[in-house]
Image (cartoon, rainbow, N blue to C red):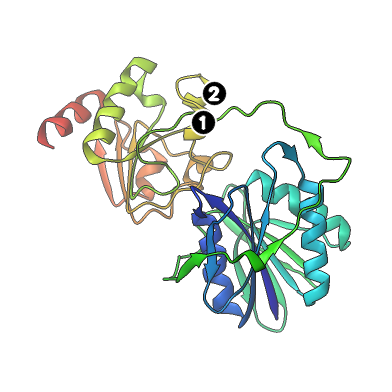
Amino acid sequence: MKILVIGELKDNLLSSDSLELISKSVEMSEEVYLCTIGDVENPHAKIDNLICKYIRTNDNKLSTHATANLLSDLINKESIEVIFLSSSYLCRDLAAFLSVDFNSAAVTNVIDIELQNTFNAITAINGGKDLYSTEIDSDKKIVVIRPKSFEVKDLTITEVDQSDFLKLENLPIDTAINEVTIEPKSGPQLEDSSIVVSAGRGLGEAENLSLVNDLANKLNAAVGATRAIVDAGWVPYSQQVGQTGKTVKPDIYIACGISGATQHQVGMKDSKYIIAINKDEDAPIFQISDLGIVGDVHSVLPKLLELI
């Protein structure tokens, strides 16, 4: 079985999501292809024992369709059967193009793969309470994986050779990009931090977020949030953890004033160690917590800050 992983870059390196897909692929097959997409000249995206290609995009053009054409050509040329993509905006767009090219429906939000006599993609449904298995019997199996679904293995990564570049033609229908706005980021990021401190509606008002920020600063942690306080405008969407936000899997997840609705649990329940602070002893978050503190977050957090 030949597998193609569509990789992406972050700071000139393969993204953590891409490394997950690569790690899972090498478990499943000895014939793994990696095609990385980015806008830098010489990325570190070549891995030992993998057939690696690189598509350098033009940062002044939106060329998703042209990129998909190159991928389709590669898939046909190498008789690739399985295509793994992350749940990023770019990869979801590419999955749609490839789905049309190969007349094969993409299966999204996948958290695991089962190989027996059939190829089955496992997805979480009902807010993560149940698992659903989809048998994919099409010639080309297009699978979009949810972040933090697989463990990352030790991989030897080097710089891509010029001979591995796939030329991206500038087609007349390319769309010009007039402006790109990048949200400024500082400190540990949600996707990669080993500690996450998340805020919920139990904080009462936006001003009380300073307690969570102070704790995160002392622990060198990333700050997360529930959908409720994102919708209220307290924090940007980029900090939302949950079914409609980001999936995190830190070593320690500290939930501050979070009741723990199913939609939030989907995004953090696989954290290695969960600490919850909530004044409601019946809050659902305590059902998945390793340590629960029943108390008012406004009283508990200042005490924690004093002790750290």
Find residue 231 and name its label: 2
- In the rendered image, which quarter is residue 297 located in? top left
| Left or right of 201 on screen, residue 243 | right
Of residues 269 and 79, the one nearer the viewer is: 79
Q: Where is residue 159? Give x, y as percent.
A: 51, 63
**Residue 10, how many percent across, how many down?**
51, 49
Q: Circle 2 sits in a helix, a strand or a loop, which is it?
A: helix
What residue appears at the point 51 percent right and 51 percent down from the top-left corner?
12
Tell me if residue 73 comes above or below residue 119 in the rendering. above
- Which residue position is annotated with label 1? 227
| Contact (Cβ within 8 Å) of mark 1 with mark 2 | yes
Residue 255: image tag: none
User: In the structure shown, which secondary structural element does the residue marked by tag 1 occupy?
Assistant: helix
Looking at the image, residue 37 sits to the left or right of residue 173; the answer is left
Specify whether residue 166 is in view.
Answer: yes
Graded by Cα atoms within 10 Å as few (under 14), some (14 to 19) or many (20 or more), the crowding at tag 2 reads: few
Q: Position of residue 44 (x, y in %)?
A: 51, 60
